[in-house]
Amino acid sequence: MQDFVNRLWYGKLNMVMQLLVWLLLPLSGLFYLISSFRRQLFKLGIIKAQKLPVPVIVVGNITVGGSGKTPTVIYLIEMLRRHGYRPGVISRGYGVDVAGTREVLPGMSPKEVGDEPAMIVSRTRVPMVIGRNRVDAAKVLIASHGVDVIISDDGLQHYALNRDIELLVLDGERRFGNGYLLPSGPLREGIWRQKEVDFTIVNGDSCRDTEFLMQLRPGDWQAVQCSQPDESKAFSIAPHSVAIAGIGHPQRFFNTLEQMGINANKQHAFDDHQAFQLEDIIAIAGEHQVLMTEKDAVKCREFAKQNWWYLPVDAKIDPRFEQQLIAQLQP
């Protein structure tokens, strides 16, 4: 299903698919009216956005699907720490039904907190709280951990939380797709929204003068079975290896492998946030070596085979971005 939707929104369309886009336009119009009405309620102050006692950096996008938000959040955590800040992260926790708020602790299952929160805390050990109400989540972080800056993961459209800095992450290859709002296209808000944010980070492709280029650089292969990166065995590519990816833009992972000179015997894209079972992967790979993303690995550790490996990536962003963000963050 995800592959079909991606082709509908981002690909070259045949006549039948173009007709489907047009048929969905009335629903896009309805989506526009509802989202615009909601936005105006906050803009006019009819619904008040809540201000926190610490700065809030919102990381988000205006398109559905993977753009590189999670590597960006990890980059921000590490960058803020270098400058002496104590950051904390809040998130909805995609696919998790949380009553109130829940703190994300190292070793927690993605079933408890969501795959991206589990990955972020596993990598950084940052204080993190998930919950439907991001204001409540942020208050828990401040009270429990004394953080002095909040990073709101995927919170661009969560207007109930006042923000000091807005950061838009954009897939450089796909950008805004066909330019239509949901469901005719991938947009949560109109392209005009880019002009309102403080920074636009473009993932993996050429960017425009007002944007900052981000490149995801692969690290060393890690065994999925290992709980800590430094426990990993030496990696070597095996015959008949299978690459899998359950992320928003799976082809980006497969392209990275090819750029590294790794030619997997088979590639298989799962839906984003796929809740993996052992049987899902065995059905695709059998007993062969499996290569996957770090986000997928956190969902497979409980049942991983010895020859399953994941590739961590680190975001590298134009140095001007760090200078300008820190300058804006300071009082």
Image: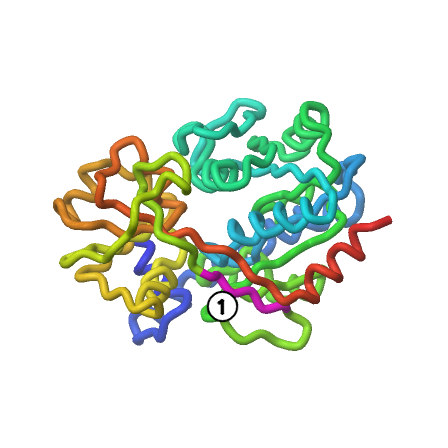
Name which residue lies at 25% across and 45% down.
308
Residue situated furthest right in the rendering: 331
Residue drawn at the location 33% of the way across and 55% of the way down: 2
- Number of residues whose C-alpha sits closer than 10 Å to that of mark 1, classed few (under 14), some (14–19) or many (20 or more): many
Residues 247 and 145: in front is 145
Q: Decide whether the magenta segment is chiefly helix, strand or loop.
A: strand
Q: For this view, does 97 lie left or right of residue 8?
A: right
User: Does residue 47 appear in this view?
Assistant: no
The picture places residue 51, in percent across and down from the top left corner, at: 78, 38
**Left of 324 or right of it: where is 93?**
left
Check residue 215 for magenta coloring. yes
Answer left or right for 187 relative to 246: right
Compared to residue 78, the image places residue 95 above or below, namely: above
Task: Please name whichever residue, 42 or 151, is drawn nearer the observer in this view of the structure.
Answer: 151
Among the 4 quarters of the image, the one containing residue 320: bottom right
191 over 27 or under it: above or below: below
Task: Give, as a single range, the part of the protein colored magenta.
Answer: 212-217
Give the residue number, with chain letter if any, for mark 1. 204
- Residue 246: % across, % down: 34, 50
